Image: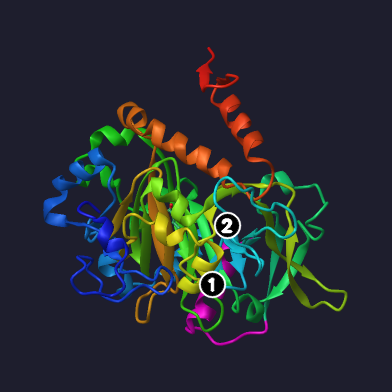
Amino acid sequence: MSGSSPSSSTCRGDKTCGAQTTLPHPAFGTCLQQLEEVFHWELDRFRGFAARSQPCVLRGVAADWPMVVQGRFQDNVQLLRRCLGNRRCLVSFDPTASFFNYEIPRSFQTKPRSVREPSGADAPRLINPGRLEMMFGDFLTAAELKHGVVAPTETAVRAVSMPYDADDAGTGRNLKASQDILYVPLRELQQLSLYCVDDAADWPDDLLQEFVPGDLTTKLDMPEWQPFLRERRLWMCAGGPEGTRHLTAGFHWDHLQNLHAVISGKKEVFLVAPLQAPALYGTRFSRQAQWNMSTSEHGRILLEKCDMQSIESTSDYTLVSIDRRFEENSLTHPAMVEEMKEPVARAMLYPGDAIYIPPGWWHSVRTWQPQSPEALPFSMSVNFWYEMTPEAAAAQRSMLLTLEVLSCQHALAGLPEEHISKLLKKLGVKEESDDGFTAVD
Ligand SMILES: O=C(O)CCC(=O)C(=O)O
């Protein structure tokens, strides 16, 4: 995303603005900038992006993976069913196409920093997806139904409704139906957004080889990252609610180096530089709810938003959303336009492509279900998450700390100063009375 100019952030569709897409995006009201691309024959260029902590697309880096090459000619669903069908998995669901979206009262508007945001019932509430534990084979069937490749059925599948946040497990306070055993008709499941996220370490090696045959660091000539591999996560998205082929995960940022490769379907990734946080209004402190599924007395499936106990979410999420129109985003957060000093970057990833998302970069991901005749009835991708090398950690430390402080300042629940005190305690920093902070051993 180098070469961005402040002037392009104010573009309203002028072809001379330098941004590559000429129509303003409906959520931002400005042109987006296409993310820089590295092609598979010039992968050594990646080193420069990594050194500068700049995101980029890695076109075709996984183009030779077996599933990308021959996927559509093989019955991979059968293979998955045989190897994993009877394994339990967690499936996130939502009746909307927007995961991690704030529910924002009509009258709510962010204020200049000096004025405290409301943090009661008139403040925004983060809506987390619901979670069902079910057999992986049942997720596959639901995905096939959503994809229209198997005939409608009256079958119900056994699932357990799970709390989104472990802190809410077993409290029984808010998630009244939590951990209930449900028999969910597949025709009900098929109407929802469904997303199964799995740890690749839980897959048998020979099966994994078919889908994720190697570590991307070898191709990128980044052996120094290899010892820092923390996790490979498989993302399997069966699409949005009935009639919608996509679903969107809201803007958030991570602490790890992220290489995310697409195996089937498409991903549209929106990126905003870390310190543009004030333009998006992100925080991890807000009232939260999660979707919950339960059964009524008459055996009907009920969906409701249940309040959660914790006011600290798993990531910072933002009031500005790519699923809201510019008018709504800027009415809720009037400073959005003025604070957006660089254009939002966008990248479309196809099977075999990957994206590099450095720590701290805000990303919102819209996942598109594959179209027939691709063999998998869901989109599939894998991310490789690496801890930062000590050098990168030292270089990014103050930026990441600034992000944490902004998250506290933007709190929509609790007191910002209390969140900051807690953060400093966690970091081993002692507050001084007036002028700053001193480290404690
Ligand atoms: O693909 C998605 O839905 C989200 C991916 C993501 O947030 C990530 O790779 O960090």
Left of 126 or right of it: where is 373?
Answer: left
Residue sitting at x 74%, y 54%: 120
Residue 325 seen in the current view? no
**Few, some or many residues within 10 Å of mark 1 (<14, 14–19, 20+):** many
**Foreground residue among 276 and 127:** 276
Check disc 2 and give the amino acid type: Thr
**Few, some or many residues within 10 Å of mark 2 (<14, 14–19, 20+):** many
Q: Secondary structure at mark 1?
A: loop
| Above or below 30: residue 395 | above
Placement of the N terminus among the 4 image quadrants:
bottom left
Which labelled disc corresponds to residue 97? 1
Residue sitting at x 61%, y 68%: 94
Q: What are the residue bounds of the magenta stretch?
A: 134-154
Residue 360 seen in the current view? yes
Which labelled disc corresponds to residue 310? none
Q: Quadrant of residue 407?
A: top right
Label 2 sits on residue:
110
